[in-house]
Image (tube, rainbow, N blue to C red):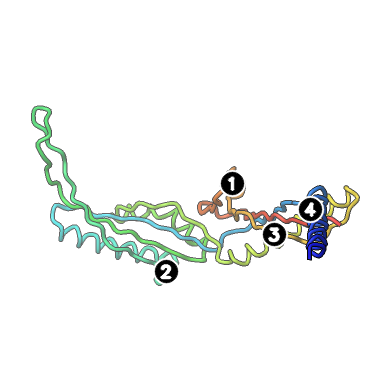
Amino acid sequence: MKHLSAIIFGVAIVVAAYFLGNAYVNRANPPQIISVTGLGNKDFTSDLIVWEGQFSANSIDLKAAFDQLNKDKEVVRDYLVSKGIDAGNIIFNSVQTTEQRDNKYENGNFVGTIFRGYRLTQTVKIESQNVELVEGVAREITELLNKGVQFNSYPPRYYYTKLSDLKIEMISKATEDARLRAESIAQNSGSGLGDLISAKMGVFQITGQNSGEDYSWGGSFNTSSKKKTASITMRLDYKVK
């Protein structure tokens, strides 16, 4: 019985020594990996524009201010339609009401406020794929001042409706770019490119063309430029043959 135990103990030592030795060899000779980052980018032109403007009416009487705002609303609507804007693309938001007050002081001390009236404002928004038409309207909207409407125009925002397809195209370009880089590295080192181990997508960025915008770690998404550049990175890890 003691002889059998000694044999088992000896076998266990040999097996343990084998695995420890094998682990040491693997540790001393880790698998060779090539890690590369590829870039895919493309210039494109926005095909959707969103433009907003705001008009207002003032009166000491709330109803009078509201009636005037409604009249201005019809003037704005008729003007936009006359310029070729589809009535279905014109969206009027809810009316915002603000009391206008002046601070009152006596002997340099604040004693309260004086009511001056009401200011009612309403925002109009247009979403359209006819980018050039809306751009023209936004440039000429000051014509409403001649019609007695206090109108304030905001800069247009530009979007792209085929963003999902564009992103897939960018991923494909970045992956191909990374693969070519990996093949070049392997070839120059006298090795061959093995199987792909992992692939990780970087941040998707949209910047204005010739805008000098910086890339952001969280991803930039330009809406102020009609002409844009989309870019994305892909990190690939390959085994080396």
Residue situated furthest bottom in the rendering: 88
Q: Residue 103 at x, y = what percent?
A: 15, 38
In this rendering, the label closer to the viewer, 2 or 4: 4
In this rendering, the label closer to the viewer, 3 or 4: 4
The first of marks 3 and 4 along the sequence is: 4
The residues tagged by marks 1 and 4 sit, at their Cα atoms, a distance apart of 48 Å
Q: Amino acid at mark 3?
A: Ala
Q: Residue at x 60, y 58 (%)?
A: 45
Q: Which residue is mark 4?
A: 20
In this rendering, the label closer to the viewer, 1 or 2: 1
> Which numbered circle lies on residue 215?
1
Q: Residue 78 at x, y = what percent?
A: 35, 66
Q: Which residue is mark 2?
A: 89
For this rendering, which residue is in front, 151 or 158?
158
For this rendering, which residue is in front, 123 or 161?
161
Q: Amino acid at mark 2?
A: Asn
Is mark 1 in CB contact (under 8 Å) with mark 3? no
Q: Residue 23 at x, y = what percent?
A: 79, 53
Q: Residue at x 27, y 54 (%)?
A: 56
Q: Residue 208 at x, y = what percent?
A: 58, 50
The residues tagged by marks 2 and 3 sit, at their Cα atoms, a distance apart of 43 Å
Q: Secondary structure at mark 4?
A: helix
The residues tagged by marks 2 and 4 sit, at their Cα atoms, a distance apart of 73 Å
Residue 181 visible, this angle: no
Which quarter of the figure has residue 44? Answer: bottom right
Residue situated furthest right in the rendering: 190
> Which numbered circle lies on residue 47?
none
Q: Which residue is mark 3?
A: 199
Q: Amino acid at mark 4?
A: Leu
